Image (spheres, coloured by chain):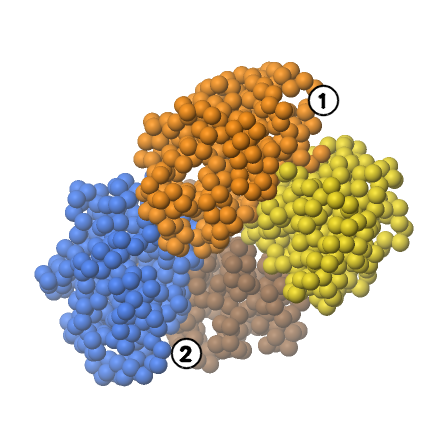
Chain colours: A orange, B yellow, C blue, D brown
Amino acid sequence: MPELKSVLKEIVEETGKVAEPGKATGNIPLLSKADTKKFGIAVITREGEVAVAGDADEAFSLQSISKVFSLTLALEDQGTKVWERVGREPSGDPFNSIIDLERHKGFPRNPFINAGALVIVDMLLDGGNGKDKDRVCELLKRLTGEDTIAVDEEVANSEESSGFTNRALANFAKSFDNLNNEVDDVIHAYVRQCSLALSCRQLAKAGRYLMLEGVDPETGVGLSEPSRALRINSLMMTCGQYDGSGEFAFRVGLPAKSGIGGGILAIAPNVASIGVWSPGLDHNGNSLLGTLALERLSERMGWSVFR
Amino acid sequence: MPELKSVLKEIVEETGKVAEPGKATGNIPLLSKADTKKFGIAVITREGEVAVAGDADEAFSLQSISKVFSLTLALEDQGTKVWERVGREPSGDPFNSIIDLERHKGFPRNPFINAGALVIVDMLLDGGNGKDKDRVCELLKRLTGEDTIAVDEEVANSEESSGFTNRALANFAKSFDNLNNEVDDVIHAYVRQCSLALSCRQLAKAGRYLMLEGVDPETGVGLSEPSRALRINSLMMTCGQYDGSGEFAFRVGLPAKSGIGGGILAIAPNVASIGVWSPGLDHNGNSLLGTLALERLSERMGWSVFR
Amino acid sequence: MPELKSVLKEIVEETGKVAEPGKATGNIPLLSKADTKKFGIAVITREGEVAVAGDADEAFSLQSISKVFSLTLALEDQGTKVWERVGREPSGDPFNSIIDLERHKGFPRNPFINAGALVIVDMLLDGGNGKDKDRVCELLKRLTGEDTIAVDEEVANSEESSGFTNRALANFAKSFDNLNNEVDDVIHAYVRQCSLALSCRQLAKAGRYLMLEGVDPETGVGLSEPSRALRINSLMMTCGQYDGSGEFAFRVGLPAKSGIGGGILAIAPNVASIGVWSPGLDHNGNSLLGTLALERLSERMGWSVFR
Amino acid sequence: MPELKSVLKEIVEETGKVAEPGKATGNIPLLSKADTKKFGIAVITREGEVAVAGDADEAFSLQSISKVFSLTLALEDQGTKVWERVGREPSGDPFNSIIDLERHKGFPRNPFINAGALVIVDMLLDGGNGKDKDRVCELLKRLTGEDTIAVDEEVANSEESSGFTNRALANFAKSFDNLNNEVDDVIHAYVRQCSLALSCRQLAKAGRYLMLEGVDPETGVGLSEPSRALRINSLMMTCGQYDGSGEFAFRVGLPAKSGIGGGILAIAPNVASIGVWSPGLDHNGNSLLGTLALERLSERMGWSVFR
């Protein structure tokens, strides 16, 4: 197996040569001007080795990657009851599609499309006495041991005042009685978890519990049931990259979750937790350089779960 | 790790206690009367150990599992050109849905839904000089070393005279110029590969090249590019159980392909090739006891790729 | 031609014998308890003859019939510019479906499905300086000469606090930049026009401008372009009864608009304006007895436009 | 009312000035080269006056207009039983869409989309002892009194060898048990009725029974129930121009049925039967100049049913 640090170095070089590294998201005004030349990667192995390269310590907007952590909290709150309100199938549609929600009568296909993530946030508000809107932030602080992790309030404000599609999805779910809290409260909590700012290094740290059967080796923070980690990994594999999940599994072969801020959290089970970031997106809304980097990393290190 | 043989014994016992083991397929008249109490399983490990239990030597109708082998042949014929005519994403729709084919202008979402499999068969006819309709049968003979593997002609006739949905899909693909051969020829070859009769033991044998990076350890038969095996595994993971693929990944955590004959081929990469069969199906068209058996096997042996 | 009054009498008798006159709407709590035995009808002919029968003077909730009047105002405000933001085709989907809105990128299929009506209301707010939320009420007062016409505030409150589907539609339209005003303002104005209370007699009066090329014979109130009336009639014919419009045209043969309050406004061009009401709905959300009554009336009087 | 002949003359002049008169159909190779400058119109009034202009005696391919006549025959064969296998609602989708057929489990939305027309043809084969494949041709001969009306065999061959979408639709309907005859037989009969060649003058003649409550004044040929004519007219109004039916009703205000050969049959009930033809099509597949001509005719003569 090649040396991890030198592989990361090669990856930074290769991604640096890509002439057209995608476009930053147009969905959130504040993020649309991100520098698509930025690229960072951080890997933490099972043994605790940390390797970083590029802009690995620059904070970016977590966006949909936060859905992994809110799902984790909902599963801890409610166990398998979660699946009475959200499915576990890839949707075959874009992440913000509302078509499936009508076809399936308000039952979102999985927790990683926006409709499903909103229902999950609704569960967190239930579980957290309806007031605590920053539970994902608290979890990330515990997982990373870093108290400075915080919501980027400017991004949050920008999203909250413009997120009409998400409001449509939340109202539509509520019209089918699949939202207990007020739409505004759900949107507020959702937008705040999406607007959390993390670096690649912090993200890789936060993902360690998924690499090692649900318990973070350093903090001891973990899931009440170890098998929960592998369930979350399986959902990341089949549904984590929206309508590009099949392609991603084909190229990279690792469970992962992307966000339109350009970040991706990827897990090599039992081997490594990986955070990667570059703001330019492909047509499915996944980081173009981030995906390329993970493809190379998986290939060079032999980390694909399908090998 | 527990002893494989005793785990299989436990599984036969557990599945034998299931009071309602699903219903045999209604799609093919001849298969609809299958005995849903039948259950067989066969496992071949990387080291060549063979363990079987139940009706592991009874032949059943391969049906959609054949799509794994026809895809393998198409990739050997045409390499990545295959992906110019078929996608790699889960569809979010039932296996015989035609909706996606219209939405995506004749480009099937993946090679494991019926529409995609028909386009793959069309490629095989191209590659095999348009005449050779039993290429999957020939491949299976080579992979298993068993010359007796054959099409069940009665099943083939039953399917060919009744498969109106597949004829609709083939004609629809052809209307978008995504079928080069005559519809009747494509249907004929497709029906024949689906009607191949194999036992669990033979199926597990046939799958060994997917377990070990593309080369069958006993026969030496293999893929021209080792990485091809892991690509096929990834497609089985995201798309192999139709609209139940997410659920299957969640419960079992192994790449697998099901057929409405009740068989499932599952691969524990680098560890084992597994054939399982029981004719009763769940609402997605996947073997109910077969899925349960694989869930237990994965759990007891720790074989999930997400662990 | 039979005498109108005696035909109405026959109709009241026939509808009175229907054992299962549909179910009141479940969408609006306050309306769900309406007495489905209620039935009223009022006809005003071109010559000014007024014939009524049954509960013709009992006020009911106008609901979607108000869309005819808001469309009229929008056309007077903006002329053909209206059609840059709303289409003129039947949708083939239920009235509150959001699927088409995604397929057509926020462009509603016609002004009589909810999505289209919300966009029309948005135009009225533009045209009326963004403040005047009761323009349909004002128009109805002018058309009927009755100053007592008013919003049923209790119904309005009930709808405004429960209309999650409409909020989903409005937000979704806004996500495609097809809504200029705030969602809350649009919903508020929309709910108020839907909650207007009218009797059959008042409704028939209000519809006279559509019978006689755009000018109300009594009040002189009318459209700035006479041809506008026949355009509105054509839209009522093809899209006025939601996903039951074809069936209604087949059975009744008159342009008409229904509401889930159980009312229907029907126009026999150049002949009569008709208001009918009975709260029980069929599976498409149209008044069951109201439709039956119009079928008989059209048949007995020879009023179908297709004759 | 202006003089009919002079109105037709004006129309020929106006249509002659249109610089871009649409494109001939690309669906049928043989028709794709039609001269889009061709334009003909023929009007027969209730009183028997015949007025023609342009290329009114040139034969063109009837195509989907034939669906009006096959529906007429099916209604005569089976009465209201027809509606147990075909609906009466506009589809909101293109004429050859297969999506609705899956959503509605093989029950076509109306008899004028291709799926519905194929089911109607299936009924004709039932009613005509399964052998008589040219029943529409026979009907047209009777309605026009012209024995020379015939199938254009070259067009029929061209269509039969290329109509994969229609074969897909027929097979799909059959998969839901909504086709009794063999797919090949249904396609054969369908293609033959579509390939009938008529002139505008013949078409206007053939449509007279729809103008006058089901009985052709000259031939005495008619429907067994007069009301049947107005039902067919209503279906032409709501579904006759595919996904442009609402637009057509809005602009023209007459029941009509178009074909991709560029012909349109329009009925001014109780007033006139109109045949018009020009091969250039708009984006919905309806004759561009034909629609424009009917819009002018309706406007100048005051023939809209909504007036």
Tell which subunit mark 1 falls on. Answer: A
**Crowd band around label 1 with a 10 angstrom C-alpha radius: few (<14), some (14–19), many (20+):** few
Q: Nearer the viewer, mark 2 or mark 1?
A: 1
| Type of the residue with mark 2 | Pro
Q: Quadrant of the C terminus of chain B?
A: top right
Q: Is residue D296 left or right of residue A277?
A: left
Q: Is residue C220 left or right of residue A122?
A: left
Tell which subunit mark 2 falls on. Answer: D
Q: In the displayed structure, would residue D161 be above or below residue A154? A: below
SS class of the residue under badge 2?
Answer: loop
Q: What residue did someone put label 2 on? A: D226
Q: Position of residue C269 (x, y in %)?
A: 26, 66
> What residue is rendered at 53% in x and 65% in y?
D107
Q: How many marks?
A: 2
User: Can residue A206 be seen in the rendering of this structure?
Assistant: yes
Q: What residue did someone put label 1 on? A: A1
| Type of the residue with mark 1 | Met
Q: Position of residue D46 (x, y in %)?
A: 36, 72
In the image, A103 versus A70, the foreground residue is A70
Q: Position of residue C254 (x, y in %)?
A: 32, 68
> What residue is rendered at 14% in x and 61% in y?
C149
Furthest residue toward front: A220
> What residue is rendered at 51% in x and 62% in y?
D104
User: Can residue D192 be seen in the rendering of this structure?
Assistant: no
Q: Position of residue D296 (x, y in %)?
A: 34, 55
SS class of the residue under badge 1?
Answer: loop
